[in-house]
Image: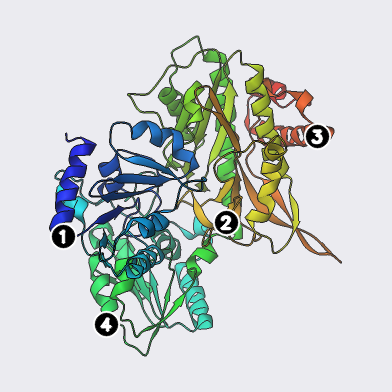
């Protein structure tokens, strides 16, 4: 197997042959998915960094990787010996990729990338940088494909349908809603490239990406027609029949690139600039009017309908009961039988399977013991898997895909003696989680406005955590679902007004490199509160019911109000889950939900 320096050398030869001075390799597939199938892991291939977010830039004498704070420790380790330099996004002293290119690009030089894996707005930004330097862009070359000799093929796994009893709304009604939004915006053609939006619309799911039940596809929607571009070998005759009843016309997957060239100038096209790839955008004739906006599908699916909410609560209850049984098993067995990071994660999934209607994990499990937990998105491998000892803490950030919906839950468990520093850090994270989870606010604010409730306990102590506080959760789709989020800075396309029916995670954390990491994550439902002379108020309802490990709580750090929030949450945990537990489990749970 070739080394990263050898791959970089091969890439530079291809760059020279194509007259490219700077080549960009992002994380995404053709649909701007956050997580991608094996075929699309080009950035992993060329840098060795396996995190879910990052963009590589290679020049003739330089190679760099931009990634965010979740991955600074992981990337630092994985880039050792590769000659690839880490660029820490949003950190002082580190320019953005566009700023770096604008500084380094010389007059007449060329920026290259595969336009199918770069979004419309990113590609436009690179083109603007090149234009400033009288340079060029070359977006029709996949140089990684030319040097990746054993590249895995694209998935050919079959699709499946999600019945209305889970989806809560028919595909016909969803298509009608989309067309209504198109008309309101003045568009008569909608080019949709995001698989989770298409799967949500048509009530189908796929298996093209590990853990995420997505079907790689494109769609072109008009007031009369719905054109679906997909490998139809993945579709059963039954699915094809249902699509035909909806008026959906099937086309070969890649034909969309030619078909958009035929859109005439008397049409107006709706595009999501964060999701449509640059190659597809560039193939739409320049004279065609364009409406750039968030896709209607994305706006619709982030607000769960009543059936989805009812189902999601069932899924959360199942996962909460499974976690309580896991927590009890873990504390009673660590040090007595061999348990590793991977086997602990597998055991949690065993408890989930016992709850019924379990499909598969909803994302790659994070199970990290001791110092591994300081790597925010550490996922154990057979090479890194370590045995748990009756000391320290285990962090598990895992999720389940049930027919009733997807879950995403993080807990940090005490396995034995821990330091006072660990207790204090854990308590601070718990205070942060509860402070956000108990938020009340007026309608019209975004997750940025209330994120400070989670960070303020840290900020008051001149501390912080270097990742977002929460994200929307898809219903058997992407586990990270835009645009709902809690974050400290506004990011266009990933920040939205908090609407009734949104499900958003609450997951502050704290990490001490080389020692430990702590994260506590609940899912929250955005609910309407009272309306009075001051306006419509909203509140957040926790729909995850699992104890925060009292073995790690330092009550002396908590105010009276903070203790009451913890006690109220633990009472809720017991009241909701105890009917599903046996007597021994109930007695055990009483201990871990006792008032402090």
Please determine whether, in this image, residue 339 is positioned above or below residue 130: above
Number of the label disc, if any, that sits on residue 18: 1
Badges 2 and 4: C-beta atoms under 8 Å apart? Answer: no
Q: Which residue is mark 4?
A: 262
Task: Inspect this view and state whether residue 161 appears.
Answer: no
Give the mark toward the camera: 1 or 4: 1
Badges 4 and 3: C-beta atoms under 8 Å apart? Answer: no
Q: CA distance from mark 2 to mark 4?
A: 35 Å
Mark 2 or mark 1, earlier in chain:
1
Mark 3 or mark 2, earlier in chain:
2
Give the mark toward the camera: 1 or 3: 1
Label 2: state its secondary structure.
strand
- The extreme right residue here reads 533
Callout 4: few (<14), some (14-19), or many (20+) C-alpha neighbours within 10 Å? few
Q: Residue at x 41, y 38 (%)?
A: 364
Q: Which residue is mark 2?
A: 484
Number of the label disc, if any, that sits on residue 564: 3
Callout 3: few (<14), some (14-19), or many (20+) C-alpha neighbours within 10 Å? some
Callout 2: few (<14), some (14-19), or many (20+) C-alpha neighbours within 10 Å? many
Badges 3 and 2: C-beta atoms under 8 Å apart? Answer: no
């Amino acid at each position: 197997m070739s080394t990263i320096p050898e791959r970089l050398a091969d890439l530079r030869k291809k760059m020279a042959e194509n007259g490219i001075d700077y080549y960009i390799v992002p994380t995404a597939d053709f649909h701007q998915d956050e997580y991608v199938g094996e075929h699309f892991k080009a950035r992993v291939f060329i840098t060795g960094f396996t995190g879910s977010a990052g963009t590589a830039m290679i020049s003739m004498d330089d190679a760099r990787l931009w990634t965010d704070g979740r991955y600074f420790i992981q990337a630092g380790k994985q880039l050792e010996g590769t000659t690839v330099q880490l660029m820490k996004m949003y950190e002082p002293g580190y320019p953005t990729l566009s700023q770096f290119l604008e500084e380094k690009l010389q007059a007449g030089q060329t920026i290259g990338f595969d336009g199918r894996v770069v979004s419309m707005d990113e590609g436009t930004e690179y083109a603007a940088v090149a234009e400033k330097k009288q340079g060029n862009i070359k977006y029709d070359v996949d140089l990684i494909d030319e040097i990746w000799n054993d590249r895995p093929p694209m998935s050919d796994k079959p699709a499946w349908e999600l019945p209305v009893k889970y989806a809560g709304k028919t595909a016909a009604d969803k298509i009608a809603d989309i067309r209504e939004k198109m008309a309101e915006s003045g568009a008569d053609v909608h080019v949709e490239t995001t698989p989770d939006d298409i799967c949500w619309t048509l009530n189908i799911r796929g298996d093209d990406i590990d853990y995420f039940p997505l079907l790689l596809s494109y769609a072109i929607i008009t007031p009369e027609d719905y054109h679906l571009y997909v490998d139809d070998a993945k579709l059963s005759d039954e699915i094809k029949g249902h699509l035909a009843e909806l008026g959906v016309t099937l086309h070969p997957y890649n034909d969309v690139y030619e078909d958009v060239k035929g859109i005439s100038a008397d049409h107006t096209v709706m595009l999501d600039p964060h999701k449509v790839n640059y190659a597809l955008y560039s193939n739409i004739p320049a004279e065609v009017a364009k409406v750039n906006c968030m896709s209607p599908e994305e706006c619709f699916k982030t607000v769960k309908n009543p059936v989805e909410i009812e189902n999601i609560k069932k899924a959360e209850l199942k996962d909460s009961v499974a976690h309580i049984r896991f927590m009890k098993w873990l504390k009673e067995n660590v040090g007595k039988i061999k348990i590793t990071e991977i086997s602990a994660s597998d055991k949690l999934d065993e408890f989930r399977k016992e709850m019924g209607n379990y499909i598969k994990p909803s994302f790659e499990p994070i199970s990290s013991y001791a110092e591994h937990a300081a790597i925010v998105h550490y996922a154990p491998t057979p090479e890194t898997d370590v045995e748990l000892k009756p000391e320290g803490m285990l962090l598990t950030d895992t999720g389940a895909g049930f027919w009733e919906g997807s879950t995403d839950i993080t807990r940090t468990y005490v396995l034995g003696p821990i330091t006072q520093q660990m207790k204090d850090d854990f308590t601070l994270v718990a205070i942060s989680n509860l402070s956000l989870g108990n938020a009340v606010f007026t309608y019209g604010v975004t997750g940025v406005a209330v994120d400070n409730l989670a960070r303020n306990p840290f900020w008051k102590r001149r501390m912080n955590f270097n990742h977002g506080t929460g994200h929307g959760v898809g219903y058997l789709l992407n586990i990270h679902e835009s645009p709902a989020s809690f974050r400290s800075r506004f990011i266009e396309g990933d920040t939205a007004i908090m609407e009734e029916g949104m499900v958003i995670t609450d997951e502050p954390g704290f990490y001490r490199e080389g020692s430990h990491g702590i994260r506590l994550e609940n899912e929250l439902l955005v609910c309407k509160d009272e309306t009075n002379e001051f306006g419509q108020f909203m509140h957040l309802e926790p729909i995850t019911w699992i104890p925060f490990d009292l073995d790690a709580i330092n009550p002396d750090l908590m105010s009276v109000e903070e203790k009451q929030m913890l006690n109220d949450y633990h009472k809720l945990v017991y009241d909701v889950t105890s009917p599903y537990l046996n007597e021994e489990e109930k007695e055990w749970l009483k201990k871990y939900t006792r008032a402090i």
